[in-house]
Image (cartoon, rainbow, N blue to C red):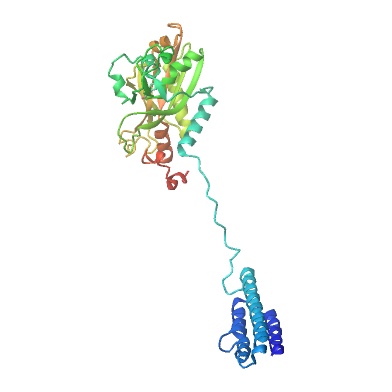
Amino acid sequence: MIDQLKEIQQAFTTAAAQAQTAEQIEALRVEFLGRKAGRLNEVLRTVKTLPPEERKTVGAAANAVRLEIEEKLETFLRAAQSSGASDVPAQDLTLPGLPPRMGHVHPLTQVFDELMSIFTSMGFMVYEGPELENDFYNFEALNFPQDHPARDIQDTFFIKTPITRAEKHSFPTDRGWVMRTHTSNMQVRVMEEFQPPLRCIIPGRAFRNEATDASHEFTLYQMEGFIVDTDITIGHLFWTLRELFQQLYKKPVKIRLRPGYFPFTEPSYEVDMSCLFCEQKGCRVCKQTGWLEMGGSGMIHPNVFKAAGYQAGKYTGFAFGMGPMRLAMLKYGIPDIRLFMENDTRFLEQF
Ligand code: PHE
């Protein structure tokens, strides 16, 4: 009987050497360990007929063989599966891989980068400043008269926290804090710090307390620009704006300065650019006018120079304010301003 077990063990080792697939290994399991016709079971069935003292040794030996076969089958099966020789379909290594997800430069950032490169090539410096601003720089220094309704034109977010005594020394007034309503807050800050000749742009965020729709955001981006020197004229303003748009949109455009009103410029102009989409024939984008509104501008008001401490009558300058969100919408054909802030990857990955 012990011999018979040895034979089975031998037969298994020989057969196992041939088996490669999971299927073949399963067949081996049935042949050797199967309940009904398994070779080992045939032996075990006769163990009962043996005298008790033999039954013990033979039984133990048979069990040892069974364990050994089970273990080996298990190992073979694992090897067969990991080598790919099983009936599980192997990976097709010629298939293209999954592309890694790439980040994109936000379209607004792209427009800002382009604006900064255009302006720095014209000798402008880039300056940034605070979004939480004192009433002085946002309004008063810019010739907004006290309690003038012009302060409400811009739908200001007023901040309730009062100005501390220490802060009072830094500002000529203590009218309080606001979220800056425009990047024009930086005009006097920059003028206080630098003497003319001065060319500066200020990219940044501004805040307006108003409802959002397809063309309004309460957090908006602006880019302010201004020049202060002796003998700066409207001609300089006109040339600079047209040059800016032509470089940004990479085609010739016309510019129109329409009379407007800002307390800090005199005269003040609304800046119009010939429509990019219809050669001024009239289309949906320009609302059939042939012109697109691009921003505000004007010649810097003498009171602004005064607030900055510049000598009266010595300098002239121009200033303008653009909405880079609007510039980007026109450049890329983006229909809704809210898309910039939503961070929807389906939108962002198109740029
Ligand atoms: N600050 C103005 C606005 O937000 C734009 C502007 C800037 C107008 C500079 C004139 C000069 O509407």
- Side of 321 relative to 199 (left or right): left
Residue at figure coordinates x 54%, y 22% from the top left: 123
Instruction: Identify whether 7 is placed above or below 263.
Output: below
User: In this orientation, which residue lies closer to the viewer: 255 or 183?
Assistant: 183
Q: Is residue 250 visible?
A: no
Residue at figure coordinates x 57%, y 58% from the top left: 97
In the image as oriented, which residue stretches furthest toward the bottom?
49
Residue 215 location, x and y as percent? 34, 36
- Side of 107 relative to 93 (left or right): left
Residue 229 location, x and y as percent? 48, 13
- Side of 76 relative to 316 (left or right): right
Q: Quadrant of residue 7?
A: bottom right
Q: Is residue 192 visible?
A: yes
Instruction: Identify whether 203 is placed above or below 281.
Output: above
User: In this orientation, which residue lies closer to the viewer: 329 or 195?
Assistant: 195
**Quarter of the rendered structure image containing ligand 1:** top left
Q: Quadrant of the N terminus?
A: bottom right
User: In this orientation, which residue lies closer to the viewer: 44 or 340?
Assistant: 44
Residue 305 location, x and y as percent? 42, 11
Residue at figure coordinates x 53%, y 25% from the top left: 120
Q: Quadrant of residue 58?
A: bottom right
Q: How many marks?
A: 0
Q: Quadrant of residue 186?
A: top left
In the image as oriented, which residue stretches furthest toward the front?
53
Instruction: Identify whether 137 is placed above or below 89.
Output: above
